[in-house]
Image (cartoon, coloured by chain):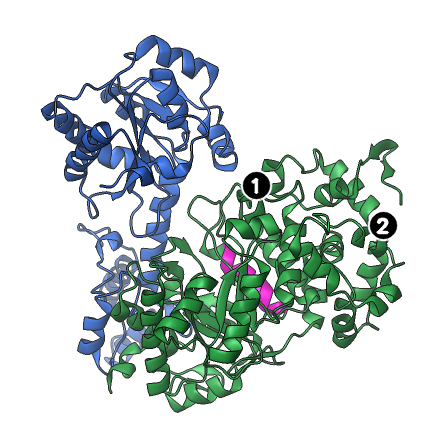
Chain colours: A green, B blue
Amino acid sequence: MILKTKLFGHTYEFKSIREVMAKANEEKSGDKLAGIAAETAEERVAAKVVLSHLSLNDIRNCPAVPYEEDEVTRIIQDAVNETIFNEFKHMTVAEFREWLLSERTTGDMIARASRGITSEIVAAVCKLMSNLDLIYAAKKIRVVKHCNTTMGLPGTFSSRLQPNHTTDDPKGIMASVMEGLSLGCGDALIGVNPVDDSGESVARILKTLDEFKQKWEIPTQICVLAHVSTQMEAMEKYNAPIDVMFQSLAGTQKGNEAFGLNGKMLQEGHDMMLTHGTSVGPNVMYFETGQGAELSSEAHNDWDQVTLEARCYGLAKHYDPFMLNTVVGFIGPEYLYDSKQVTRAGLEDHFMGKLTGISMGVDVCYTNHMKADQNDIENLATLLVAAGCNYIMGVPQGDDCMLMYQCGSYHDPASLREIFGLRPIKEFECWLEKMGITEDGKLTPRAGDASIFMSR
Amino acid sequence: MEKNLKAIIEQVLREMNITPGSGADLAASAVASAIEQANTSVVEDGFIPDVTEVDIKTQYLVEDAENKEAYAELKSYAPCRLAIGKAGARHKTDPSLQFRAAHSAAQDAVFNDVDQDFVDNMGFFTIQTQCENKDVYLTRPDLGRKLSDEAVDVIKEKCKKNPTVQIYVSDGLSSAAVAANVSDLLPGILQGLQSYKIDVGTPFFVKYGRVGAMDQISEITGADVTCVLIGERPGLITAESMSAYIAYKATVGMPEARRTVVSNIHRSGSVPVEAGAHIAEIIKTMLEKKASGTDLKL
């Protein structure tokens, strides 16, 4: 492999694949904070040139953390189908990019290739893609998963209803659930981020959600986004009904340790879902990720945030999740500075997740100390639907009173479906029609009236 | 519109058998000038209601709701934007503008500096961290935890040495929080400490400060307890929320768990004057127990 090139006659020499990978990234404040970003725009392009000539074999042989030291690396490397890898390993990253984009390459062919590559390869090709490349390639890849209902089928676009509350008040949570449902939101999941991460409190919220779901016969999934150990306690000790089990992931073992997590716990959670969970399955896990998480716990091993994010998906794949979303603008301006960087990261994450074989959603969001606003994330949501994203989030008017950030509104999934001619998950759509909330794929005049759920 | 009106009037005049060119011309021109006046907007006195004063817990914008009263009662338990109706699949105009107003306050609180006159009037001198501007502050949290060399010298020169308690104010992520709370909060704390006869050092203002800067300040002043009053990252419910981080003998590199936090200080949360008394009490306990954060049971 060659780690040297010239640009305008000027020599650029990189010391390692790690340096090439970091410097080939589009500009991100998090890579600068880590001190690993390209110093100039030209150096960035030089790194991309060098990266484009590396083989997939070179990239696979240079994991972000050595195999012996890191269980995430082991999970990713052990999952590689060696027969498929052998077919691809002599391709350069440039050739792999063009293979993905080629009119002869179908979604099924990409799904097969996905079994033979590592997360570092996924990240490498992402770095050579423009934003429209990311949309174009991701659009080809369809990932369909089943829990109680089926997500990701052609012609559908789903949403997670996120009825968070500042004190986990059950009445307040249900008021928000009703509003979201009345606007056609919630076919992917009704999922609450709890304030109180205790087994008892989490079980109480789950039971409230489940009771409502049963009473109104809503074909969807429910979840409370507590730590995996808390959810296991809620299930075992308090008999909590869980359709999908949640966990935040990082892309290194050390990063997961900062979350109080390891692969064994995830496996136990997954196995308990199969023996104690309330859903049909087989896909019973839900993960959240986001660029920058590893650096924030100093677990990045001097690697860039795009590569580490790809490794989250590699780890997630091991548990074959129903859904995964990157929480793309939550972490703050020291990792993603402005709307341009958030937009890029959202498209990167979505593409990388799909190329890994994950049922991808995106929490298009921003905090108030970022240079971004609601217009920017409405733009990103629109781009993601064009890219074939499985789902986005909905909260009341985009304002999450508990997590103190803004994301998609309960209104947005319905708006985007109407614009793109898409529908929610079939069973959920039938339910919406039965309730008089939608008709022919559009919200009815009656939609938005949450008080219809107060009648029984 | 104007043309249509003219045509209608001319037709009416014709039907009344008044031909143009007769005395009716005068009447016609009077009508024309009246029309012109009606097309010129007149600025009236009065105010359009303040969209930021709407109580989102009671606002109900869904027309002809089936069970309005029952849902209005339920939604009063949720501090979020519910029963906001829709325009097609989009938001209605009023809630859209309410949201924009809330976000504008949040952005101004983050991106604008604290008014220097306010700092001067409080009698504070100002020092700066290693962040040279707001952009560096937002993207380099590490530099917001370190004082500039000049700042270190100024503290050494101007501050009382080894006070029992060192209190200072910092902008953090909300200049609005400083402006809204400090003039009530700080006197509240000082009064409380005075009543306990606890000695207080020289207060000052740290520009572009993160919470961690208090550790270096504690080391320089040699205070037993250090307390920073700092602006929180704004949400859309309020941009004026402030927190007090308090630590017993803080040192650079100590675990975060050694800080005690009093958060959510603003006019509709923990009211500044009362929060001040509460903080003074915590400081007293800290000095008695010689501990803070998770080491201190309050």
Give the secondary structure at mark 1: loop
A172 in relation to B204, above or below: below
Task: Report if residue A176 is visible in the image.
Answer: no
Q: Which residue occupies the extreme top position in the image? A: B157
User: What residue is shown at x 82% (from left), y 71% (from top)?
Assistant: A103
Choose between A414 and B294: the one closer to the eye: B294
Q: Nearer the viewer, mark 1 or mark 2?
A: 1
Screen quadrant of the C terminus of chain B: top left
- Horizontal side of A275 relative to A402 (left or right) equals right
Q: Chain of mark 1?
A: A
User: What residue is shown at x 64% (from left), y 51% (from top)?
Assistant: A308
Residue B71 percent across, percent down from the top left: 23, 75
Task: Report if residue A128 is visible in the image.
Answer: yes
User: What is the count of numbered marks?
Assistant: 2
Residue at which label 2 appears: A54
Residue B271 percent across, percent down from the top left: 17, 42
Q: Which residue occupies the extreme left position in the image? A: B195
Mark nearer the N terminus (1 vs 2): 2
Q: Quadrant of residue A234?
A: bottom left
Residue B67 percent across, percent down from the top left: 22, 81
B174 in relation to A217, above or below: above
Residue B253 percent across, percent down from the top left: 46, 29
The residue segment tinted magenta is: A376-387
Q: Quadrant of residue A391?
A: bottom right
As drawn, the label of residue B30 is none
Residue at which label 1 appears: A298
Q: Quadrant of residue A408?
A: bottom left
Q: Chain of mark 2?
A: A
Please tell me whether the stretch drawn in magenta is mainly helix, strand or loop. helix
